[in-house]
Image (tube, rainbow, N blue to C red):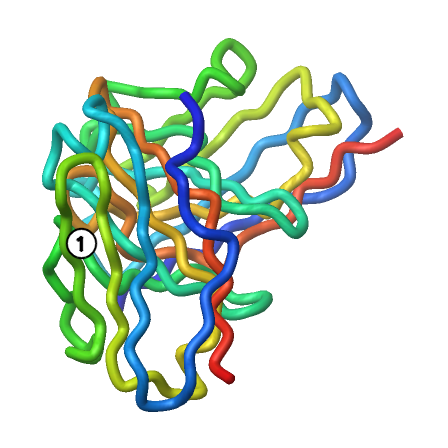
Amino acid sequence: QSALTQPASVSGSPGQSITISCTGTSSDVGNYDLVSWYQQHPDKAPKLMIFEGNKRPSGVSNRFSGSKSGNTASLTISGLQAEDEADYYCCSYAGSTTLIFGGGTKLTVL
Amino acid sequence: EVQLVESGGGLVKPGGSLRLSCAASGFTFSTYNMNWVRQAPGKGLEWVSSISSSGTYTYYADSVKGRFTISRDNAKNSLYLQMNSLRDEDTAVYYCAREYSSWLPGYWGQGTLVTVSS
């Protein structure tokens, strides 16, 4: 399976909102409400930010939110802060107990 | 606190083998499905393999099927990845990851680097 499609990069100024898209197919993103989003700082392990499409784990800021429409999931970060600068990855359950990740998006806080 | 600590990475020649381990603590290991995810240098995340909580069911990405074997020892709170017939393209940091919900990874180890090179 090919990776989910994410923009290579997005940017925003402090205080602004940005949205990162994650496009799959009717076999993965479009067929299951099982999309997660991860934040990864350089040389660090990924951190779960959103699970099951729009749920936040305990401890994750409510500035992070998730949504889905058809075959595309989205991560929105509001009130951008300098520490949000990182790589972001989406991941979807793809049936038959396989997982598929997006190619990653580099977020730059200007 | 959930802790996952990988070990076993290193330099290996193409065609060689390596066994990764992941020591888990801070949760009831035997009740969670587990995953291996890798990240090639400068690249994105790639799902490698998953195993059910009991160890009965195993799943693999096409890129490693037939070469890698995932296993677990619930008595030792440990997850393993046996990697055979290694190729240059298997070079990556390998992460052990516990599911958060429905197999999706939620807790990650710090990773262990596997380098396949002659």
Residue plotted at (32% across, 46% down): A22
The x and y percentages for residue A69 are 13, 44
Closer to the camera, A17 or B27? A17
The x and y percentages for residue B66 are 51, 9
The x and y percentages for residue B21 are 49, 41
Q: Amino acid at mark 1?
A: Phe
Q: Is residue B35 above or below residue B24?
A: above
The crowding category of the residue bearing disc 1, from other C-alpha atoms within 10 Å (few below 14, some 14 to 19, many at least 20), is many
Closer to the camera, A46 or B55? A46
Closer to the camera, A61 or A47? A61
Residue plotted at (53% across, 46% down): B44
Pointer 1 residue:
A51
Q: Chain of mark 1?
A: A
Residue plotted at (40% across, 40% down): A5
- Picture quadrant of residue B2: bottom left
In the image, A87: left or right of A32? right
Disc 1, SS: loop
Q: Is residue B51 above or below residue A5?
A: above
- The quadrant of the rendering that contains the N terminus of chain A is top left
Q: Is residue A73 above or below residue B13?
A: below
Closer to the camera, A102 or B102? A102
Residue placed farthest to the top in the image?
B66
Q: Is residue B99 above or below residue A56?
A: above
Residue plotted at (33% across, 43% down): B76
The number of numbered discs placed on residues in the rendered structure image is 1
- Picture quadrant of residue B56: top left
